[in-house]
Structure formats: structure tokens, C-alpha cells
Image (tube, rainbow, N blue to C red):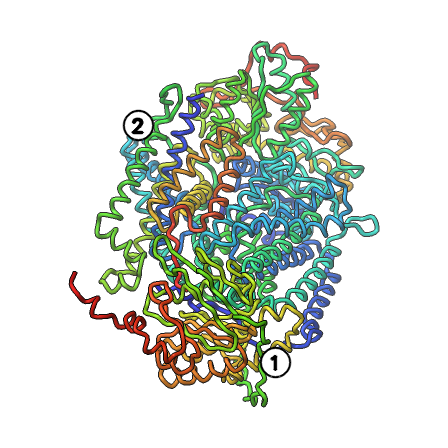
Amino acid sequence: MSTTVLQALIGGLTMGGVYALIALGFSLTYTTTRTLNFAQGDFVSVGTFVGVGTIALIGGALAIDPASYPWAYLLAALAASLAMGAMGLPLYLAAIRPFAGKAGMSWVMSTIGFGIIMQSAALSLWGPGTRMVAAPLGDDVIRIAGAGFRSQEIMVLVLAMLLLGAIDYAMHRTSLGRSMRAVALNRDAAALMGIPVERIMALSFVVSSALAGLSGVLIAPIMSASLFMGVVIALKGFSAAIVGGLTNLRGCIFGGIMIGLAESFTGLWSAQWREIVVFVVVIAILAVFPDGLFGKKLVEKV
Amino acid sequence: MKLFRKLVLAAAAAALPLAGASAQDIKVAYNGDISGSPSAESGQIGVMGIAAAVEDINKRGGLLGRKLVFLVRDDLGQPPKSIQNMTDLIDREQVAVVFGPTNSGNALAWKHIANQKKMPVLVSSASSTAITEPTGKRPNYLFRISMVDRDQAAALVAYAAKNPEAKKIGFFVETTGYGQAGLKDMEQIAALHGIKPTVIEKFDARDTDMTSQLSKAKAAGVDTLVVWAQAAPLGHLVRSMEKIDYMPRVLTTWAASFSGFPQVAGDKLMEWPVFLTTSSAAPSSAGQSLLERIGPKLANRSMFWAATQAYDTVLVWAAAVEQANSLDGEAVQQALENLQKPVDGLVKQYDKPFSIQDHEGLQAQDYHWSRWQGGKVVDFEDPTLAAMTAADFKK
Amino acid sequence: MSTAPSSESIPLPPQRHGAGPAPAWRSAAGPVLVAAALAALAFSLSNDFYLRILFMCGVYYLCAAGMNVLAGYAGQKSLGQAGLYAAGAYAAALLTANLQWHPALALAAAPVVAAAVGVLIALPSLRVKGPSLALVTLAFGIVTEKLVTEWTDVFGGAQGIYGILPLTWDDEPFSLQQWVLLVIALALATHLLLAHAIKGRFGRALLSLQFDEIAASCAGIAVYRYKILAFVVAAALCGLGGALVAQQNQYFNSDFVTFHLSVFILLLVLLGGAGTLYGPLAGAVALTLTDVFLARWPFIQHFAYGGLLLFALYLMPRGITGLFERKRTPPPPAPAVAPPAAVELHRAAPGPDGPLLELRGICKHFAGVVTAQDIDLQLQANRIHALIGPNGAGKSTLINILTGVIAPSAGTVLLHGHEVTRMSAHRLAARGIARTFQNLRLFGAMSVLDNVLIGAHTHLGLGVSESQARREAMAVLAFTGLHDHAHTRAGSLPYGLQRRVELARALASRPTLLLLDEPAAGLNPQETRELGELVRRIGGLGIAVLMVEHDMSLVMEISDHIVVLDRGAVIAQGRPKDIQAHPRVIEAYLGTDAGLEEE
């Protein structure tokens, strides 16, 4: 019995780490621009395929079997992050900037539209089928205390935690991070302080998209890669961000882990009702805490 | 390559009706999934088979002296789209026959439309039993040359019942229409054998981690799983099995022959399940020539059955049209139920394949027990199978 | 950080200029003619392909009309409408399949079931805004989708429910043509009902929710109730659409219920023109036609859909109807109508003896910061009271407690002797307490007249007709000198006039007590003088006034009674003369020498 619990724990933390990465992306863009990329899922999926394509390219160009060379995978992750990060810029320019600051949520529609276009382009390149991506550290099952894990799960868990720590450090200890937080809190004051607000906002989208692409490559060996897989993952990342408090970076991380664990442990009881339970819990949390568990309620002066 | 192929298909679909399509030409159409779901592979290959058949018939002078024109509609695996395509094809394009679809759920969604409009439909891929069952007193216009879930379930459950090593049986199904219908068939047949499954577990077609459901089966001591799912989830299922170190016997449907399965399962695990297919390793001579034509385009040779079955549906329909000497839906439907001359197809020779009660072109005798070995689908043999008789196939 | 909602950026249709709402029969004539034309078209078509297009247009129109109320008017951009569509469809399916109900009954019951489900989604959505609302509604949609997929025993999952009994005519199931006629009839009925509701009090109340919930509730609008109502309307209509599709197709399964459908329904509204009467029609027609004619090329269709989402709202921020609005030349300014000769405003009925409003022991603390300490206060009818004190004294807190915006930590509030301590803002407004705000909270995108009409919301519901309400509103405008600006967009007026509009809005609710929070802030001396005049005249109507102010000359000139607050406690109260000489007041405002001593 405890092996299944251990399995669920590790599985939950792994997926939770990925959700947290995506949640961070949402938080970054929301705090700086008050908008979100509703097509984040498509960035995850396309990032995966950029990674897959890179690996295939390396394998073909160097006539090697990429599965035996972990650095190929590393390059793929890098390529995915860069490519998707680069896509973050046109996303910002075309879908966000025209609408940011305006009332109504037109940016919801426009980001979804951007995602659909990107997905259509990707579909024509790679088709709708699923691909299995070989795990860089081998596909064998590792047994710890009777529970089975694949190397990829451990790797994702470790990498995700490292990344989250790094981003947390960057946001709180570096001047760039401070600038971003300044823009989030008070755009005008930040501008007056000489912070290039527009560039920071664009940067937040670039970083957010890069995180999404990276998440896709990380997840691919665990789930199979398909151009439709990202939607559900991003949705859970979104839930994690809002439940944790969209404006609170650490809250987002917490939210991600929480959702990963909730999903995993509900799965022990009944795999089918997993998502239903998780989303009902999300709704319940928001009903009681409209700003998320750790979100700051903007106290309005009436 | 994919984009090119898409463009070619689209151009063909668009151009064929325009160029050279005169009022005299007969329009035939395919309505199914060629891009959206894991089953799309069989749709794409089926389209190739139909196109080849249309080409061959036109080379022989056409049907009733008229040329055949082939339209293709992609339904993305979605019922609303599939329904939309049907009304487009029936009411606007006014085709003479519809081939397809790929997904069982879609066939069931527009079955009543085909029957209401008296449009003959020949299915070469979707296997849900309910597709060819008549509804009420009205004649059913859907015919099939393909595996039928009922027969597959009969075979799999019969094997599980006969095998002395299979003491506790579990049913694992997908929550799609395909999986659900399969479960119903399995349960009914198991009851005929007096067997009750120890566990019944369900999983989503997009799931990649079934360890939770498998743990329950493992805890209950299940040693044989009969699985009803598409290729990719089947692959993830066996991977999950490996993860929790639980390898029961796996019996499953033809979905295991689709490319998605070996891709996901990997070299080692893909050889584990035992399943049923319709095409044996060696095709007939007519099949051989088709294999030469479209073989290069097939990523997975084991999917060749999708092409041969589709090819045969065109042949059988053409034979019915010639017998009825008309394209009228009602006449063709009655001719199909009453085919006088045997038709030499690629899969087999069809001798009075359909009747009023039975719209299935292939029977259990036409199925082959198979498994993957060395990257190819080969025949599976074992003592239990050898000992099975016709009486074991209760359905 | 400024939290006043941006009134410039919400696109709204221009207000109708002229005397008032057109007579009911005249506004119904247009839609009836259109419906008749469509019915004629349906009769002439025999090709099921085109009939199906008409049918889906109609179904999507119903969904869009409902969604328009929720997203366009109430401003709740819900992303979970697919769940309501499913609720209606499955209701119709299961009622006939399992309970053997008559199909017509099932069709009628479907919107009711969907409405009940709509309440379920409305409840958690009440307090959330923006992305959180998007998530709550989205999560709801996903939960519904998963529920109908996984709970196969009840909903049939992906295999779906067959043999849904359709409506029959002459023992034959409805032909597509008959379905189209039915849908046209339903669409017409929906349009007429909604148009009537939207043009009046209901529509204004919903719009106010979008712009400023706090101002709306202080004007007497029960915010939560209206939000739930908007959700219910949207749910019922989407459910009806789903039920129609289920019955027409005689089959329904979980594959029909997707996130894509929710986005599509929202897009119908946004593309057509949110918050307009004909937006849903434009959206339904445009998107259905695009969908159908591109269906042959799914790749292009997909791409076109993405492009539409990405660019359409940028090129047409007001949707399709917005394009037509812009082309219309603005009508000539309404001829100046002389204000009604005798400006008779509703006089406040004299209440029973005793103080109008009484506070006993009111305390309020925000996590350790005490803003009100044991405040005892009495306000008399027919008096102008002023509340003064240094910044941070707790004056606004007190006003917010009196108007129900925040609840006191301890103490009681009595109105006419009845306890109203924790009563919500809109109920206090209904009992005759009205207010203005320190940071202007006008509904800037609406006309001045509409702002005032919103103020009159509570008694509009009690048997006062729309035309009478308009007359009274014009009288209030005349009283406050805003008659000429009745049809101008409130947000476009100069600041001083905007403050007066807020005052007029408060007056329109026929208050017995009017609370003004720093009404002279930002006004120049001339405007301040005019304000003083106006407040005096208001007092003359028998309305009690409590004014929070810093402008001492104004306070001293017009007040009958002054209360001085310092650090949350009342330090003095009395007539202006007494207060001016009060030593503690002087100390609080100017400080004393004692405070300057080093310790």
C-alpha cells in the first residue's frame, strides 16, 4: 500500500512542478500587464514538437541515435525554450498590446486566436499524431522501496524544483526581477524611475512562453507528445496560478504542487474522477477565497 | 511531407468535382477522420484504398458506363462535424454512396440520417457492433466490411475462458464510444460463458498513467486483461504495467496493430499483447499489387488491412449497383442484401456477404490471431487456440 | 493606486436620442417582419443542407442572445457555457429516454433544468472577477464535460444517448423545415422578451454591474441577485439551444460538449457586438455561415477561426453592429427643451418622531487599526449635518458603515428606530439612504439620464412605469441644473458637472437621508458656492443631509449641526458657532504646543 502512496507522491510532485512552472508564467504576465496568455497550452505543445524536431535533426545530421546522448535532449530543451520564448514577442505585439488596459477581456479571444494559428501551422508541419519522445536517461523503470519510477519523472521533478528556486531567487534578488515586480505594482511609478516598462511587459511574455516551451519538453517523455496535449496541462497550470493567488509568485508555486498532489492522490481512489474532483476543489477554493489562497486583496478605497 | 500530402488531398478533393466532373459522373465520398484522432491513420489509409479502387474501376470503363469521382471529407473525429459533412454530401453534393467513417461514435451519430435519406454507407474501419444493427422496422443502410466488436469480443472472451491459466479476468476499457460499446459486448458474452470479470476499470483515451487502475487489478490477483482501447492508450497501459511490475496476459483488439501502439510501447513491450487482425502476413495476389502501389506511402505496413478493406467496400458496392442497374439508394440497399454473384475482393471472396439480418462482410473465421514480433505483425499460435472450436465462440 | 474603473474604454452603443422608448408595438414590428421573411425563406428551401444552416443559425442565435445578457450587459465573460448547453441537451434526452416524457414537455423542461444548473455556476462566480471568473466558469465547463464523459451510467458518455424522441407532427418526426420554423418562432419570442427587458430597468441594472458594483449596490441594485439572474437567463437559452440540437439530431453525446463550444458562444457575442440588441443575430449569422462554408477545408477553417479571434476584436472593437453604428451620422443635438416650469420634486415624507438615524457604540477596526471607536451619533430629519475631522479620522469609514458598504465590528445602527446594522447596501438604499462617493463613481459610459434612472431603480420596480420614471428623472435633472446634458455621456462632462450627476443620481432614489462624501473636492470656489446652494435646496425638500467635508467655509455656512471626528472618536458636536471655538477641535486640526515638546 505504501508503495502506491509513494508512487502517487512522486508522480504528484513531478506534475506539480510542471504545473508550477506554467503557473509562474501566468503570474509573470498577469502582474506586469494584467493579461494572460490563454493559449499557453499551445505553447507547451508546440514547444514539445520543437524539441522533438531538434532531436530528430541532431540524430539525422550527426547520424547518431539521439536516445543514447543526453546532451541532445539538453539542446532540445534549450531550442524549445528559445523558440517559444521568441514566439512570445509576436504574441505580445499582436494579441496583448492592442488590448491591454482596455476593459473587457478581448485579449482572451486574441490570445486564443494566436494559439489556434500557431497550432494550425504546427499541425501542418507535424500532423496530429502522437509521438513518443525517448527519455534522455533511459526508459528503464527504477525501483525505490518497491515503487517504480521512470528516470524522466525524477529528472523533471529535480529540474522543476531547481528552476522554480532559480526564478524565485531572480525575482527577489536581481535587479531585473525587482524591475518586473515594480512594474507589476505600479506601472507609472516604475516608468518614472526609469524602468523601461514596455520592454519589461514584453519580456514577461517572452519568459512565460519560454517556460511553457520548456515544460513541454520536460513532460514529453512522460506523456506522449501531441499537439493537443498542452491544453489540459495549461489549464491546470492556470488553476494553480489562480488558486495560489495570481499576483503571488510563491503562491503560484504552492498552487501548482497542490494541484499536482491533489490530482495524483485522487487518482489513487478513482482515476476517472480525478479531474472532476480537482476542478470542483478549485471552484470551491475560489468561492471562499476570491483572490486565491495567497492573493492580495486589493483593498479599494471607497 | 505531411503538408504536401494534405495539399494534394485537398487539391484532389477540390479539383475532382470541378475538373472533368460532368453531370454524367457518379460521385462517391469518404466521410471520416483523416487527421484528428489516434484512429486517423486507418482513415488516411482507407482513403488510399478507395482512391485505388476508384481508379481501377474507371480504368475498366467506369460503373454503368459512367466515371466515378471521389470526394473526401475530413470529420476530425468529431460527431458534429461528421454530421455536417453527411448533410453536405447527401443534400448538396448528392453523392451516390458514402464510405467511412473512421470512428464508431461518428457512425452512430449520423446513422439515422443515412437511413432517413436512404443513402447506402459502407464502413471499412469503425467496428462498433451497433452500427450495422437495424433500428426498429426500418431497413438499415449501413454495411460493413471490417472487424466487428461483437465478434472480436466473442473471440477474446472465448480464449480467456478456454485458457486454463486465465483464472481471474479483468476488463480494461477506454471511455470513448468505442471502449464503452466494447465493454457492453464483453460483459454480455462473458455472461454467456458464465464468467464474471474480477475487475472492470476505465481510463481516458488521453491518459498516460494507468497505474492506479492497474494497482487495483494487481491487488485483486487478476492474471488476464482483456483491453478495449485505441493504440496510444494501449501503449501507455503496458508502460504503466511495467512501472508497477505487473505483467498479466493482455488480450486486445485490432487497435494494437495501429502504429501508435508500437511507437508508445517501445520495442520490448510492444510484443506483449495478443490481438486480432483481419489481414494475415501474406496478402493475396491482387492484394500484392495494391501493396506495391501504396506500400511506399505506408508508415506502418501492418495497417495495410485498412486499405484492402476499403478497396473491397468499393468493389462490393459497385457489384450491387451493377446488379440493381441503378444508383437509387433503396435499390442498391436491397441489391447489397441480396448479392447474387460472388465478388473477388482483396481480403477474401465475398459470397452473399449480406442479408437482411446481417450486414457484416467479415466473420470471425476471417480474423487472425496476431502479435508483434521483430517489428512486424505475425500470426500467434498456442495450444489453447488450437483446441478452440466453433462452439466456443458464443455470441 | 487608482481604482476608479476606466470609463473611457468600454465600448457601448450610442444612446438613443429623443423622447423616450418607442412604443412597444412599433419596436416589435421590425423583428416580426424579419422573422416572417425568414419563415418564407424556410418554406421555399427544400434542400436540407441549407435548412440545416438556418437551423444552426437559429440555435446559435438563442445561445448568443442569452450570453449577450450575461457577457454583454452584465459583463460576466463566462467560459463555461458548453456546460449549460449540455445541461439542456441531456435534460431533453434523458427525460424522453428514461422517464418517457413527451418530447414537447422535455423541450420545455430543458431550459428550466439548465437554469437550475446556471444557478450552480453563478454562486461561486459572484465574488470573483477577471481571470478568476474566467477560471471558475472554465472549471465548471470542464467539470460538466468530464462528468458527462465519465459518468456513463447516467449520461452515456462518448457513446451517447440514441433515439432521443423528437417533436412529431402527424406521427412523423419534425422535418428539418419544421424545426427551422420552430426555431424562428422561439428566436422571435426571445428577441421580443429580451428587448423589452433590456431597454428598461433590467438592462440598466446589468450595465451598472459591469461598470461599478459598489455604486450600483448603493443605488439600490441587488448585485448578487442580478448576477444570478443574468446567469440564469444565459443558461436557460443555451440549454434550449442544446435541447433543440439533441432532439433534432435524435442523438447526443459527450463529444458535443467542448471548451471550443464555450469559446464559440462567447465569440458569437463579442463578434456580433456585446451589449447591443442585434449583436447576437449578427454574430450567429456571421459565424454559422463562416463555419459551414469553410467546412470543406478544415485546415483553412481552423486557420480562419484563429485569425478571426485574433484580429476581429481589434478591427471591430464593438463587433459587427459597431461597424454599422459608426456609419450612422450622429443625430442633431436634441432641441433645447425648456425645463418643466414647476420643479416639484418628491418631498421626503416626515418620519415618526425621534432621530432619523442613530448610531450607538459603533466600532470598527481593520486588523489592529481602529478607525471608529465607540461612536454615538444622532441625525435628525430636515437638518444638514456635517462631519469634519483631520485626514485619517475615520470619516469615510463611518459613511461606508452607514451605507452598508462595510460592516461595523460592534455597535448598532437604527433607522427610524429600526435596526439596520448589518443590512446590505442595496437594502439600505431601498430604505431611503443615498450617497455620493469621495472618488467619483459614475457610470461614465452611460448618459446622464440613464445614470439618474439607475438611481431610481428601487422604486421603478414598485409599479412606477418607465415613462413616468423618465419624467421624474428629468425633473431631478432640472432641479440640479443638468437638464441640458440629459443625453450626454456622463464621462464626457467636466468634473464639476460629473459630481453633480452623482448627486442627481442619489436624489433620484427619493432618499430620506443623503450622505455626501467630500462633495466639494476638486471644485473651484464658484462651483463650491453653487454646491452649497444646491445642498440647501435639497435640505429644503425635507431630506436630511450628512456631508463629509474639508472646505470649512462651506461647512460653516450651510450646516445646522457639525460632528467632529478625530482618530475614530467623536470629540465634539454642536452648532457651527460652538464648534469653531471648541478647544479640542482646534487642537485636533492645528495641534497644540504640548505636542511639540521633546519628551
Q: Is residue A149 above or below residue C279?
A: above
What is the quadrant of residue B305 in the picture? top right
| Residue A23 pos. (x, y %) | 38, 45
What is the quadrant of residue A190 in the picture? bottom left
**Residue A277: mark:** none
Q: Which residue is mark 2?
A: A68
| Residue C432 pos. (x, y %) | 55, 70
Helix, strand or loop status at disc 2: helix
Residue C77, can we see it? Answer: yes
User: What residue occupies the far left of the structure in this picture?
Assistant: C598
Name the residue located 53 percent from the left edge and 80 percent from the top edge: C487
Name the residue located 31 percent from the left edge and 70 percent from the top edge: C584
Q: Is residue A186 above or below residue A20?
A: below
Disc 2 and disc 1 on one polypeptide chain? no
Q: Chain of mark 2?
A: A
Q: Which residue is mark 1?
A: C471
Helix, strand or loop status at disc 1: helix
Name the residue located 57 percent from the left edge and 76 percent from the top edge: C348
Q: Chain of mark 1?
A: C
